[in-house]
Image (cartoon, rainbow, N blue to C red):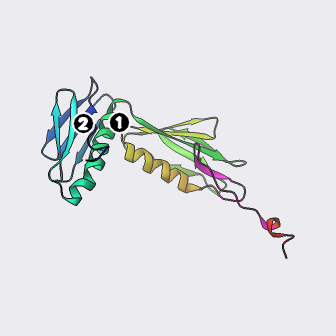
Amino acid sequence: MSRIGKLPITIPAKVQVNIDGTKVLVKGPKGELFRDLPPYVIVSQEGEILQVNRRDESRTSRQMHGLCRTLVANMVEGVSKGFQRRLEIQGVGYRAQVQGRNLILNMGYSHQVQIVPPEGIQFAVENNTNVIVSGYDKEEVGNTAAKIRAVRPPEPYKGKGIRYAGEMVRRKAGKTGGKGKK
């Protein structure tokens, strides 16, 4: 039995869950999420608890069990609390600002990079160098943060660029690192 798949999901007070076969709709104070799960799992609701079970013991059912439980749990947590991802900008002259809903990045290019957020995603900037991506869909928050990081990923020599908060960047020695070896 899947260790993650067998865990029950508790539904917070302000969250409504509608299950129609393999279709799951979750509504909450932050928004509304819908997902069509694969036919290998069965989602059932008993009071304030959701349970995800396998339809049979096939290999595919066992593979999908923990995944589907995590997807449903992320939907419930997203519409009740929301998710956020923090990014740090490092480098002289590199900075970010919010203009309306859009994020404007000055990353050393000849032009500013403008990122338009998808539906349900908000940007916040602290100290011109810390960007916070928040929203109720965990997948969308992660994808948007990855798109921002891809504008200028951290480079290994000086460490300049956009990185996730807490991300360790492996540094390389420059040209002088090889001198003295013969």
Q: Nearer the viewer, residue 11 or 89?
A: 11
Q: Is residue 51 magenta?
A: no
* Residue 69, image quadrant: top left
Q: Residue furthest top?
A: 13
Q: Amino acid at mark 2?
A: Val
| Residue 157 locus on image (x, y percent) | 71, 59
Provide the secondary structure element on which disc 1 rests. helix
Query: x, y percentage for residue 9?
Result: 27, 34
State yes or no: discs 1 and 2 in contact (Cβ < 8 Å): yes
Query: Residue type at mark 1?
Result: Gly
Q: Quadrant of residue 59?
A: bottom left
- Name the residue that disc number 2 marks: 26
Q: Is residue 166 magenta?
A: yes
Q: Viewer-proximal residue, 6 or 168? A: 6
In this rendering, position of residue 87 left or right of residue 136: right
Total of numbered circles in the picture? 2
Q: Is residue 164 visible?
A: yes
Residue pictured at 23% horizontal, 59% vertical: 60
Local secondary structure at mark 2: strand
Residue 92 at x, y percent in the picture: 73, 48
Residue occupying the point 38% across, 30% down = 81
Q: Nearer the viewer, residue 133 or 8?
A: 8
Kindly identify which residue carries mark 1.
78
Residue at far left of view: 21
Q: Residues within 10 Å of mark 1 (few under 14, many from 20)?
A: many
Report the disc number at residue 120: none
Position of residue 119 measured from the top left corner of the image (x, y, whole percent): 36, 43
Of all residues, the one furthest to the bottom in this rendering is 182
